[in-house]
Amino acid sequence: MKDPASRGHLLLVDDEPQITRVLKTACSAHGYSVDVADDGHSALTAFEQLRPDLVVTDLSMPGMSGVELCRAIRNRSTVPIIVLSVRDQEKVKVQALDAGADDYVTKPFQMEELLARIRSALRRSAYPPEEPAPARIEVGDFVVDRERLQVWVREQEVHLTPKEFALLLVLAQNPDRVMTHRVLLRAVWGAANADHPETLRVLIAQLRRKLETAEGPRYIITEPWTGYRFLPSGAPPADL
């Protein structure tokens, strides 16, 4: 039975002991119950035994890589997965997201950023996936009516084309979550168009022209080489 005082049970996976030590100390100090593993194989064993609420894993590990671990966990569970990557791992990071990871944090990172990502992922996972999608989504500055195909931003109605609406709907259903190019292309155009990112870039540009202000993107943030992140309440000015 989990400690009732715990905010959630985390499994931290990294082959560098100093990193897991620092992460465990910080996460424990913020009320999380924490277990650690130093490679993918032991992490998978620990996952099956402990059933954590969220997994944080490095990508570059001996034996089973972080991508392989994401895929193995996703075959067993919908538990949130956050991957840790370095800046030159863009291709591997995208592979991890396509394999089932929910988010990523790039090394070096501020601990507060990782903790914010953990809180966000745990909030999303609090809603069982088997629940039917609501007809009306109200999140941040947005109201999206699935049945009437209508959208309001800051209480002002915005008229979208069917494809623009389909794209915004996918983003609104996954706030503050990295959505890869491939995932968005599949959701809006189907699997046959999953390798045509230019189509997505054009639609994103159209959607931004209708939703964003002149100061630049606040709601649909580009994740370089990866995809997009939807911030329904808008990014603070420093993040633009």
Image: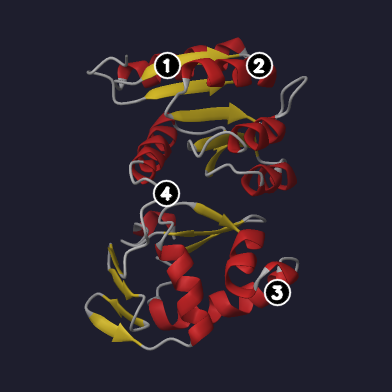
Depth check, mark 1 against mark 2: the one in front is: 1
Instruction: Tell me where residue 204 appears, x and y as whole percent.
Output: 55, 74
Residue bearing the label numbered 2:
15
Residue 95 showing in the rendered view: yes
Q: Secondary structure at mark 4?
A: loop
Position of residue 191 measured from the top left corner of the image (x, y, whole percent): 70, 67
From the viewer's perspective, is residue 217 above or below residue 229?
below
For the residues marked 3 and 1, what is the alpha-carbon distance in whole angstroms? Answer: 42 Å
Q: CA distance from mark 3 to mark 2?
A: 37 Å
Question: In terms of secondary structure, where does tag 3 sit?
Answer: helix
| Quadrant of the rendering where the C terminus is positioned | bottom left
Pick whichever of labels 4 and 1 is earlier in the sequence.
1
Q: Which mark is residue 129?
A: 4
Label ID, residue 34: 1
Q: Which residue is mark 3?
A: 198
**Residue type at tag 3:** Glu
| Residue in front for this viewpoint, 192 or 167 | 192
Distance from the alpha carbon under mark 1 to that under mark 2 = 16 Å
Q: How much space separates mark 4 and mark 2, taking CA atoms?
A: 32 Å
The residue at 76%/20% (across/down) is: 62
- Assess disc 2: are there few (<14), some (14-19) or many (≥20) residues with their C-alpha within 10 Å of its C-alpha: some
Q: Is residue 10 left or right of residue 81?
A: left
Q: Separation of disc 4 and disc 3 at Cα?
A: 31 Å
What residue type is disc 2 on? Answer: Asp
x 67%, y 61%: residue: 182
